[in-house]
Amino acid sequence: MSIAIQQPVSTLALKEWAVAIKALGEGKQIITVRKGGLYEETREFKLENDTFYLYPTYEHQKPEMVKPEYQPMLEATLEGWSPEKTTVEIRYFAKITDDVELMDEAKLRGLGAYHIWTDNFADVRLHWKKKQPLHILFARVYELAQPMTIDIAEEYKGCKSWHHLLQDVNQAQFKPVLSDEEYEAKRSEIMQLLKAE
């Protein structure tokens, strides 16, 4: 059954590596993993809203943390980018359907086929602040018909998961990256792995 979805009313955006957003935007993965930004007020991740824009970051992407088969995708995100760039393009928003907390390293390894990151990347995220769970966010992603280019403000910088865009994103047409059936099939597969004893 299809759920009616609206473009976010709030300007809230989640910062994520550009290569991960590209993978989400092309339907190559439907999950992202979070534990918090270095400068979060509570130093732990909190899902502030279930619908938000995806803000691509470039400067902290590490090629060694991305699987070899996804290196061309990483390189594609870096074409035309430089530290002096003053604008960024917002192409997608996400609706989180599930937020699963995970402490189990074996289950995290079992998710390897469902994301672009190396085992080492996943392990680092899991073991950072060991007492706090890793959040596996299931993201139903939508592509804006008219991507929006915005200036990179100082407020957007730094290691925080969330920020509010300083300008409104035009309300425009959008389309889901995956059909309802495609998304649910992938979601069900991953959920079975997470729920396995």
Image (tube, helix red, strand yellow):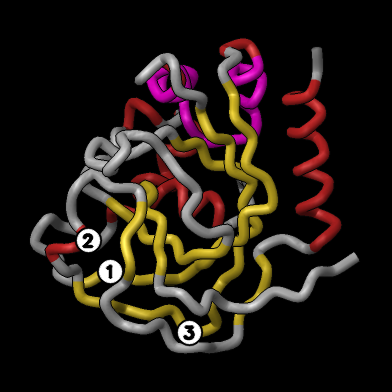
In the image: residue 157, left or right of residue 15: left
Depth check, mark 2 against mark 1: the one in front is 2
Kind of element beneath mark 3: strand
Q: Which residue is mark 3?
A: 146
Mark 3 or mark 2, which is nearer the start of the sequence? Answer: 3
Q: Is residue 124 magenta?
A: yes
Q: Which residue is mark 2?
A: 156
Query: Foreground mark, 2 or 3?
Result: 2
Q: Are marks 2 and 1 in contact (CB under 8 Å)?
A: yes
Q: CA distance from mark 3 to mark 1?
A: 14 Å
**For the magenta stretch, what is the residue range?**
107-125
Q: Residue furthest right?
A: 1
Q: CA distance from mark 2 to mark 1?
A: 11 Å
Judge left or right: residue 102 versus residue 160.
right
Looking at the image, the residue that sits furthest to the front is 42
Dot 3 amino acid type: Gln
Q: How many marks?
A: 3
The image position of residue 129, as x and y in percent, is 36, 19
Vertical placement of 179 versus 147: above or below? above
Q: Residue at x 37, y 37 (%)?
A: 36
- The image position of residue 59, as x and y in percent, is 21, 46
Residue 88: assigned label: 1
The quadrant of the picture occupied by the C terminus is top right
Question: x and y percent of residue 103 in the render?
Answer: 56, 18
